[in-house]
Structures are given as structure tokens and as C-alpha cells.
Amino acid sequence: MKKTTQHTERNSLSNLRLPALHVGRGVVCGSVTVFPVWSDADGVRGIDWGGRGLVIDEVGGGNVPQLSVSNPTPKAQLILEGDILEGGRQDRMAAETTLVMPGQSIVIPVNCVEAGRWNVGRGHRSTNLKTAYSVREARRRAFKLEPGMAQGAVWERISRIENGLGERSATSNFKERATARQARLTVSKEQLARGERIQDSEIADHPAMLKPLAGQRGVVIAIGGEIVAAEVFGSSVAFAERWEGIAIAAEIDGRLTPARNVRSQDARDFIDAIEDAHPVVDGKGTFTWEGHGITVTGVAHERDEATVLQFTATNDRAVVMSA
């Protein structure tokens, strides 16, 4: 990995720079390879990284591409792009990363991930699970062409995943794919905690069985021999909390992709490609950047200086995103 450039100017939302990152040795988990990432930036505190305290509900009588979100807690709450928001008339996924400040009430853009249901249910909640990278990329590509096409692209991709896995739910609900894996992971982790051998051989090789390393802030994910994305957080606590949902989403894409080798240098090159990014930040602290076939999205906030809370860098050229 080439020497990381040191940025000496004050970081501000108008001149935001991503933190210096360091990539470790990859671990192969079937078709998914996981490279740990560390950051030189100070750790961020005072944020609920899982959005557990949010009050999430339908807008009016229900509007597919929108949900109402309120934060009655004293901590800022984070919703990540791709987060599955369960409940209401149908399960949704967050269409963008959003920081919800204490006392704030906003309407956020979402997409339905449960095509076969539209009925009255209990209020939504954040599940800490995420949709697959290929689902998020399908939405992003369609939205760029025509915003009205995004929902159909999400449904079409979820249907392809269900058909590929041979696992269809009654309402074509992506969350059921994720929660089924999560339930098996929970059983296997409990077996390990008791000192027992894992009985589920398929889950034993699942990336979510990897424990975050000391100080780890994120990962670079490769699927089928290609770098697909990097996910980086403002603290090791945040990454540890979010890791299982990230890993489950990656493994679902991986189950549809042949296992192929990937070089550690590929992961380092991917991080090097974004180190000089100058993200464009909107009034909410949400930022974007595109270059070298990579799209970076994330969120920052500014106190004494701007701090990157989380970002995802996606390889737009990865075959798994469009296969």
C-alpha cells in the first residue's frame, strides 16, 4: 500500500477529507473475502450507531418511498443506506445514510423490500440488518437514470436473489433471507460460547463468525474474487455493532457467486483510490464522491472540525453488482 497522504489543513464540511486508512490481511469465507481496516482518526462517541431509539412510522396513511423518523433520545441516531426498517405496511430499506439529531423529526427516502405486502402493521423499527450490496447498487443505478425506476429495480433484484437461492417468501421479503441466516448464526455463536463444536457446517464458514479485531474500524469486502465495497465507521464500537448485518448482506450475494481468489493488494489499491477524495457534503452532513469507478457515500458532522461518522465505498464495476 502506498504511503497515505497526510492532510494538515483543518477538516471542515466544505473541505471534507476521508480519514487515513490501513488494510490488513484478508480472511476467506467461501465466496467472500474480508479485509480488516483501521483508521488514524480519533474515535467518535455519543452516537447510537444502530438507531435503536428512533420512532419510525408511515407518512400519513402510508407512502411507499417515504417514512417518518423522530429521535426522542439525547443521542444522535444513525440510519445507514441499505438498513432494513421492519414493520408498518411493508418492510423498507433506507435509501440513504442519515444522521438524526436529538429532538429532530424528519422524513427519509426509502424503498420497499417486501413486494407482496401492503397492510396495516405495527410501527417500524431498525433491525441492524442490511440489504445485499447488489440490491443497493440496483437501486442506485436505476435512480441515476430515472428516480421512478428505483423501486422496480429493487424488487427485480430481490426476486433474482430469491430465485437464485431457491428460497422464496410469501411476500418476496428480503428481510426473511437475512433473518434466517441471523438465526442460524445465533445458534452457532451460542455453541461456541459453551465450548461446543459448531453443528451447522455452512454457518461455520460464514463471515459473520469472524470477530472484529482490536481497534478495527471497518472492512473491505471481496465477493467472487472482486473487491465490492469498503465500509468504514467512526469508531471500533460502531463497526463491531454493525458487523453482523454487513456480513450477512455480503454472504447473501456471495452464495450466488463462485469462489475465486483475490489479492490483498487489490484491497489496498481500492483504498488508495479513494484516499484523495473530496466528497460533496449537503446541508444534512450527507456526502458523496465518484471517481475511478467507485462511488463513496456517507455522513459527517462538524463540531470543532468535521468528522466522518461512516462511509461506504462501492466498486461500480464489480460483476456481482449487475450479474
Image: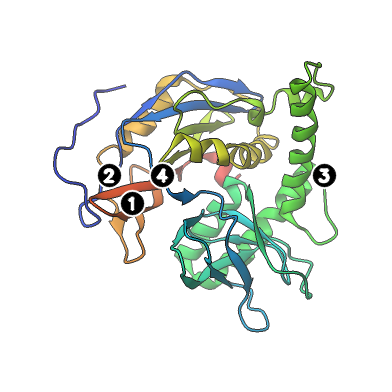
The earlier-in-sequence mark between 4 and 2 is 4
Amino acid type at circle 3 is Gly
Mark 1: secondary structure? strand
Residue, far front: 74
Q: Are marks 3 and 1 in contact (CB under 8 Å)?
A: no
The earlier-in-sequence mark between 3 and 2 is 3
The earlier-in-sequence mark between 3 and 1 is 3
Q: Position of residue 281 (x, y in %)?
A: 30, 59
Q: Say which residue appears at 71% left-offset and 48% top-offset.
A: 161
Q: Is 197 or 166 nearer to us in this picture?
A: 197
Of badges 4 and 2, nearer the viewer stands: 4
Q: Which residue is mark 4?
A: 45
The earlier-in-sequence mark between 1 and 4 is 4
Amino acid type at circle 2 is Ala
Q: Which residue is mark 2?
A: 277
Mark 4: secondary structure? loop
Of badges 3 and 1, nearer the viewer stands: 1
Amino acid type at circle 1 is Trp
Q: Quadrant of the C terminus?
A: top right
Between the C-alphas of marks 1 and 4, the distance is 25 Å
Q: Disc number at residue 289?
A: 1
